[in-house]
Image (spheres, helix red, strand yellow):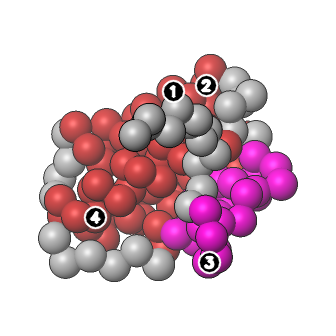
Amino acid sequence: MEANSSIQIRSHKPGGGPEAQAPDSPRQAVAFFEQIIAGLYEKDYGDFMRKCNLYLERLAIDITGASAEIFKMLERMRMYTVYAPDFDIENTRIRLIHDAAEIRRRI
């Protein structure tokens, strides 16, 4: 049997649910990211971190035309969430939402 060679670039899940909705604009994509992170409740930092990293990746795809400054901000967010975390879920959530709001203002 031949493997399916088509690759979907869309960052959102196919099917129903809020994640299936593609944002109409970069600002809407950032607002969606803020909502998802605000509602993301995990007890384990590793689970929280993996989901945040996934949503940061999706956000980067959805704001592809943004400035280099915006992408530096996204990398900084990934740094304190994934690569050099303080392992405090609530502190990281607050920082991510705050930084996303700043990105939304600058986009």
Locate the C terminus by quadrant.
Answer: top right
For the residues labelled 2 and 1, the Cα–Cα distance comes to: 5 Å
Name the residue at 17% across, 52% down. Answer: 86
Which circle's residue, 3 or 1, is located before the other in the chain?
3
Q: Which residue is mark 3?
A: 17
Residue 69: mark: 2
Q: Amino acid at mark 2?
A: Glu
* Quadrant of the image occupied by residue 75: top left
Q: Can residue 105 be seen in this snapshot? A: no
Q: Amino acid at mark 4?
A: Phe
Which circle's residue, 4 or 2, is located before the other in the chain?
4
Tag 3 and tag 1, C-beta contact below 8 Å: no
Eye-nearest disc, 4 or 2: 4
Q: Which residue is mark 1?
A: 72
Residue 30 colored in magenta in the image: yes
Tag 4 and tag 2, C-beta contact below 8 Å: no
Query: How many C-alpha atoms fall within 10 Å of the one at disc 4: few (<14), some, or many (≥20)?
Result: many
Magenta-drawn segment: 14-36
Q: Position of residue 32 (x, y in %)?
A: 64, 64
Query: How many C-alpha atoms fall within 10 Å of the one at disc 1: few (<14), some, or many (≥20)?
Result: few
